[in-house]
Image: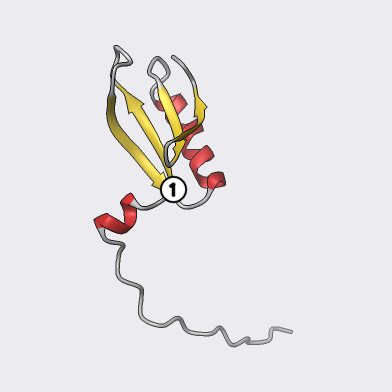
């Protein structure tokens, strides 16, 4: 026997975050230039460490010979040192 269940409806979708809100996220995954002198680009930002670590691991696979750094604000959490 099948029984129907009520699923609560979500309100209207929240608006996407602004650039300032994204920059305020505490974790950043950085791709460094080949000379290890400066950050080439921020690959991602995250609110939670678990997501930031997953992004860091994925970046290691995507850029195997490049330096990838995971930061929490100014503190280095992980650095592959490549």
Where's the C terminus, which quadrant? top left
Where is 58 relative to 49, above or below?
Answer: above
Nearest the eye: 6 or 44: 44
Q: Residue at x 36, y 75 (%)?
A: 13
- Residue 11: x %, y % from top left: 41, 83
**Dot 1 crowding, Cα within 10 Å, few <14, some 14–19, many 20+:** some
Where is 41 relative to 36, above or below?
Answer: below
Q: Residue furthest right?
A: 1
Q: How many marks?
A: 1
Q: Residue at x 40, y 20 (%)?
A: 67
Residue topped by disc 1: 26
Q: Residue at x 46, y 38 (%)?
A: 55
Nearest the eye: 77 or 6: 77
Where's the N terminus, which quadrant? bottom right
Quarter of the figure with residue 42: top left
Callout 1: SS:
loop
Where is 14 relative to 59, above or below?
Answer: below
- Residue 10: x %, y % from top left: 45, 81
Please state if 48 lies on the left or on the right of 40 as rendered. Answer: right
Nearest the eye: 33 or 77: 77
- Residue 30: x %, y % from top left: 37, 32
């Amino acid at each position: 026997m099948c029984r129907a269940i009520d699923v609560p409806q979500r309100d209207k979708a929240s608006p996407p975050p602004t650039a300032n809100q994204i920059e305020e996220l505490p974790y950043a995954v950085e791709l460094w230039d080949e000379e290890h002198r400066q950050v080439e680009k921020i690959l991602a930002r995250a609110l939670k460490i678990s997501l930031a670590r997953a992004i860091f691991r994925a970046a290691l696979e995507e850029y195997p010979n490049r330096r990838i750094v995971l930061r929490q604000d100014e503190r280095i959490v992980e650095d592959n040192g490549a």
